[in-house]
Amino acid sequence: MIRAVLAGNPNVGKSTVFNALTGLRQHTGNWPGKTVETKTGTFRHNGHTVEITDLPGAYSLRPHSPEEAVAGDFLRENCTCEECGRLDCVVIVCDAAALSRNLILVLQILEMTPRCVVCVNLMDEAKKRGIAVDTDALSRLLGCPVIPCAARRKEGLSALQDAIVQTGTETGNTGMPASAYDDIPARAQAIAEETVHTCPDTAYRRDMLFDRIFLGKWTAYPIMALLVLGIFWLTIHGAGYLSAGLEWCFDRILPLCRDLLLICRLPEAVVSFLADGVLGTLTQVIAVMLPPMAIFFPLFTLLEDLGYLPRTAFCLDRLFCRCGACGKQALTMLMGLGCNAAGVTGCRIIDSPRERKLAILTNCLIPCNGRLPMVLFLTGTLTVLATGYEASGGLQAVLLTGTLFLCTTVTLALCHILSSTLLRGTPSAFALELPSYRIPRVG
Ligand SMILES: Nc1nc2c(ncn2[C@@H]2O[C@H](COP(=O)(O)OP(=O)(O)OP(=O)(O)O)[C@@H](O)[C@H]2O)c(=O)[nH]1
Ligand SMILES: [Mg+2]
């Protein structure tokens, strides 16, 4: 059994590599800080069984957050402590488009153990942005195997498996001696300059343009409002059609179920209880609740995959800081829109315990997907009472967006009150890194 571990900076594709190697389904997504605990799986290659552990992301072995501490402690314990049983191989996953920053951790880990394999992931993204990495030169300079990969497309994984097995079964220490570097950031920069060749192409310029628009002083908030409005409008409109379709199906299925129960010679009261009570209520709930979720969640996932959600958090950071909270809270609130339980669990990505508590306590103020139909019903009823007319789909989307902004304002106000009374403290600096825009592949 070869014991290996996947380490690397946040959001570089460690869990994607882990899933591709083991066939498991660790959570992945385009924002840093998803993995907060270690997860272990196995795969077989060339007659060897490899037990591999996915670690939370870390920028350096000097931790700034609980997840970074988990990664750092795991590596320190398992690379240097003979009693814990040394790791046979550390796979350091890097972002090909941000190699100089990623190399800092690589060099730190190489100081602890020479049994490393560097996996330069996201090669497809780097190529799109006109970035080429000379992996042979990098391997020579680092003194360990360097494998180019595009984990999402499952490219380079077989070479990675070969390298893990070879490094894991090698006897004796190979590679560079410990403590070879004094100034790791400068050395990382020098290695990157020697091995990375950039020719800013249209995709890179496209990213820059998108950022100027999505993060611009005058454009960021109107775009945010328009996107929320668009998502709600699509959800409300689409859900109407889907609900009608589901109701049509259930109207035909329910009488059949009733007939089936009658054939079983059940008493009329039991048939009525099962068909009208249990099945009738269940189908009503499905027809009302399922359609908005089936539309809202994929749209939301698309925004996440495109890298827009971290940008929302980035834009809102200053606002949250003024109220004593931190910008990452915006991400947990967005998760809360899908499900408050997920939103509260997601608060683990907030580094400071004080700000984490603020985010947990206020998450319930954001109406989750299950409560959206109720908000729709209330705004619809109030519109009828006020105007005498039924609200159109567009007006309902505007009202829903307004409700969301009201909830956000109340959240900010409550954060302000809490952080000047019960949860006093200074907001920590923003530490969310913006990923590149990744257009998800279909299929
Ligand atoms: N285009 C492209 N996207 C990738 C590749 N590998 C991973 N991704 C995407 O990058 C994002 C981050 O992937 P994860 O596997 O969650 O990254 P991670 O390093 O585990 O992140 P943390 O757990 O937050 O540290 C996801 O949206 C993946 O689909 C790749 O090779 N190419
Ligand atoms: Mg992960």
Image: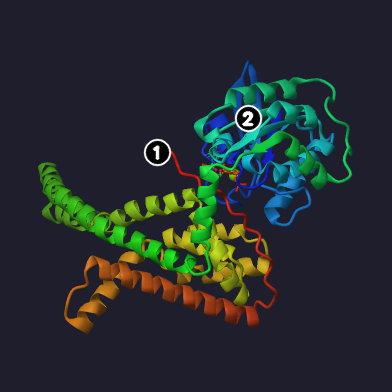
Residue 174 shown left or right of residue 325 in the figure: right
Q: Secondary structure at mark 1?
A: loop
What label does residue 148 carry, if any? 2
Above or below 1: residue 234:
below
The amino acid on which the numbered mark 1 sits, given as a three-letter code, is Val
Residue 38 x/y as whole percent: 65, 43
What label does residue 249 carry, if any? none
Q: CA distance from mark 1 to mark 2?
A: 23 Å
Residue 133 x/y as whole percent: 66, 33
Residue 292 shown left or right of residue 20 in the figure: left
Q: How many marks?
A: 2
Residue at 60 percent across and 51 percent down: it is: 32
Frontmost residue, 412 versus 305: 305
Residue at 48 percent across and 48 percent down: it is: 305
Frontmost residue, 409 versus 290: 409
Residue indicated by mark 1: 442
Residue 91 x/y as whole percent: 69, 33
Above or below 317: residue 201:
above
Question: Residue 77, can we see it?
Answer: no
